[in-house]
Image (cartoon, rainbow, N blue to C red):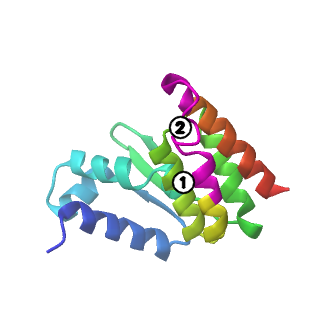
Amino acid sequence: MAKLSDLIEAFIKQLIEDTNGTIEIQRNELANQFNCVPSQINYVIDTRFTTERGYYVESRRGGGGYIKIRRVSIGHEGKNYLMHIINAMGDSISQQSAHVFINNFVDHNVVSEREAMMLKAATSDKALSAVPVESRGYIRASILKNMLVCLLV
């Protein structure tokens, strides 16, 4: 039997698919539907619908609060998706997060398997071994952003 988190994730993904990429849900209503606490819904959204995985989430708290989840559309040759990632990445990124992004690029057919291997190699801790550990995330983000920009031109 699937875990509750997996069921909630699948349900939300199906809603997103059925509505062409954007949904607006109320946390409490979804929690009632799955007979769980609203924090379980928060957990699923916070861990499974991240920018790294190709989603944009905004929420408004309070009585009429909602959560809006939008799947980032993959435009012509994935350019919209890549620009979204470049803008959302921030100044520092871990090797693990970089590899999640890169795997998603492959899943969305934005880069080939070979290009993904090169992106992973260039952003790996091994490649950055001469850089002090506390600076690797910043250097990695800079390298990845520059490589992605090259894919856009």
From what the image shows, is residue 114 above or below residue 86?
below
**Other residues around mark 2 within 10 Å, as few (<14) / some (14–19) / many (≥20):** some
Callout 1: SS: helix
**Which residue occupies 53% across, 24% down?**
132
The amino acid on which the numbered mark 1 sits, given as a three-letter code, is Phe
Q: CA distance from mark 2 to mark 1?
A: 10 Å
The extreme right residue here reads: 153
Can residue 57 be seen?
no
Nearer to us in this view, 91 or 8 = 91
**Which residue occupies 86% across, 56% down?**
153
Answer with left or right where residue 68 lies relative to residue 143: left
Answer with left or right where residue 97 lies relative to residue 120: left
Can residue 5 be seen?
yes
Nearer to us in this view, 118 or 66 = 118
**Label ID, residue 101:** 1
Answer with left or right where residue 76 lies relative to residue 14: right
**Which residue occupies 55% across, 31% down?**
136
Residues in magenta, as a range: 118-136
From what the image shows, is residue 7 above or below residue 99?
below
The amino acid on which the numbered mark 2 sits, given as a three-letter code, is Ile
Nearer to us in this view, 47 or 16 = 47
- The residue under label 2 is 93
Count all numbered tags in the image, as a single digit.
Answer: 2
Is residue 16 found inside the magenta-colored segment of the image?
Answer: no
Marks 2/1 in contact by CB < 8 Å: the verdict is yes
**Label ID, residue 14:** none
Expressed as whole percent of the image width and height from the top left, the position of residue 99 reads 51, 53
**Which residue occupies 17% across, 49% down?**
37
Nearer to us in this view, 128 or 106 = 128
